Amino acid sequence: MKTVLLFSILFCGIAMPSFAELTDADLDKIRLIVKEEVKTEVTSSEARMKQYVDLKIESVNGRLAGIEGRFTGIEGRFIGIEGRFTGMEKQLATLTYLVYALIAPIVMAVGIPQVIMTLRDNSNRDRDRKIETLTKEIETLKQQRIANP
């Protein structure tokens, strides 16, 4: 047991003077290593990103080329469609005039009965006034007859 204790004290005495302190030179070396690693990672990441962007641009350019090819075929179709539109414009103008022509009979069909109804109402009012005046005259005559038998 004494030997174990002695060896333990001896090893502790040997380990004491060794402090794990980093010097400025050690820190500079670590900084250099980290900077180099970061630079390599950044450059490799940039290279991968450029390659990815280039691939995407190429695919978009390929799609645009396909669409441009479709548009050249469509241009020929537009010329034929323009001719159809002029014919359709004429038909549309004809239909517009027809609608205008149909509006007049509709207005007359609705308006004439309305005018007749208002004229009837006016004549009914005149008749009602005459009836009222006549009933008043009859009442005054009845009162005169009652007063002078």
Image: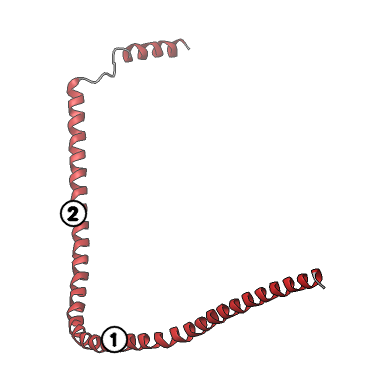
Q: How is the image coloured?
A: secondary structure
Residue at position x 57%, y 78% in the image: 121
Residue at position x 53%, y 81% in the image: 119
Name the quadrant containing residue 31: top left
Quadrant where the C terminus sits is: bottom right
Disc 1 secondary structure class = helix
Instruction: Describe residue 107's horizontal placement relative to residue 145 as left or right.
Output: left
Identify residue for label 1: 93
Question: What's the residue type where badge 1 is placed?
Answer: Ala
With respect to residue 32, does 74 lie above or below? below
Question: What's the residue type where badge 2 is placed?
Answer: Lys
With respect to residue 41, does 9 lie above or below? above
- For residue 50, which numbered disc appears in the image? 2
Mark 1, other Cα within 10 Å: few <14 / some 14–19 / many ≥20: few
Residue at position x 51%, y 81% in the image: 114
- For residue 125, which numbered disc appears in the image? none
| Residue furthest to the right | 149
Distance between mark 2 and mark 1 Cα atoms: 59 Å
Disc 2 secondary structure class = helix
Q: Nearer the viewer, mark 2 or mark 1?
A: 1
